[in-house]
Image: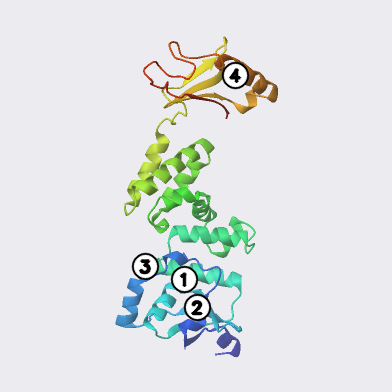
Amino acid sequence: MSNEAENREPQHTLIDPFACRMWDYHDRLPELINEVTCRDVIQSFVKDGQRHPVLARPMAGSDGVQYELIYGARRLFAARHLNVKLLAHVRNIDNISGLIEMDVENRLRCDISPYERGMSFKGWLRKGYFRSQEELARALSMSTTHVCRLMRFADLPTAIVSAFPDPREIKESWAVTLAERCADEDAKQRIMIVARSLRKREAGTSDSKRIYKSLLDYNHKPAVSRVSRRDEIVRSSAGVPLFRVSYRHNDLHVIIRRDAAPPQVIERLTSAITEALSPARPNGFGADGKLEGGIRWPSVERTLRLE
């Protein structure tokens, strides 16, 4: 074997897991690396040892870190948990080559979620490692369509992702459908409302499919009107809506679109409402607002609000 070939071959070595750190672009969610999620890896280490090496590159630092791991976050956790050495390929590798190696390794092992891959792709593009989705797709030997579909995870609002018990359970097709719905701002707001509601109501559930269906069912229903059944719309003689009178418990609100109420209109309205309300007093009540028996007239707050 030539010296050049030997230099390309990764070196297998046992390294100290406490002298390692994951590099910034690994595609595991740090908050989901724990004893529960890594239980299968820990059990495999105990039973059979570490069968698959991690990929590491040497580092020179004063903080005690000697290696940066390109992939192998769960194996690193298991080695630290068991206090055993970590089997590693040690190579000098640049960032772009590292991204490609990590994606290939994860695809072969089939234990990385579409959500994690999609969010990683977003980060790679944002950092400028690839100039476009097309360039990224060529580097990973994937179709541009597939990369585009995975990138839809990055289009999902945090409120929607948080409605699921584990974002890794969000299927690729679900992300595409939800992202398409969210392209419409009104639909997006409605889905986010139900997502927040589901997050509270479905706390502790593991039924991601039910949560997904609830989001879509809510979205396909007619939009929830912002006008209460107790609200009244006041229109012009031509039928154009002018303002809304809204009743909330003991409160009365007059609601006007902001673009229909320049300062001079607000001044006239305020003057007219003040004049109309100042002399008004319920019939049969005294100046102090009490009946002869001492019962007070319910306080009614009247407010003028612009939308």
Mark 4–mark 2 Cα distance, whole angstroms, equals 75 Å
Is label 1 or label 4 in front?
4
Of badges 1 and 2, the one in the foreground is: 2
In the rendered structure, are the residues bearing label 1 and label 2 in contact, judged by CB atoms less than 8 Å apart?
yes
> What number is the disc on residue 274?
4
Relative to 49, say whether 241 is above or below: above
Q: Secondary structure at mark 3?
A: loop
| N-terminal-most mark, 2 or 3 | 3
Model colouring: rainbow
Amino acid type at image mark 3: Thr
**CA–CA distance between discs 3 and 4?**
65 Å
Label ID, residue 105:
1
Q: Quadrant of residue 230?
A: top left
Q: Is residue 284 above or below residue 176?
A: above
| 251 shown above or below 24 | above
Q: Which residue is mark 2?
A: 55
Q: Are marks 4 and 2 in contact (CB under 8 Å)?
A: no
For disc 1, the neighbor class at 10 Å (few under 14, some 14 to 19, many from 20) is: some
Q: Is residue 142 visible?
A: no
**Res. 114 mark:** none
Disc 1 from disc 4: Cα separation: 73 Å
Q: Secondary structure beneath disc 1?
A: helix
Q: CA distance from mark 2 to mark 3?
A: 21 Å
- Pointer 3: what residue? 37
Name the quarter where the N terminus is drawn: bottom right
Task: Note whether 289 is above or below 187 in the view shown.
Answer: above
- Residue type at tag 1: Glu
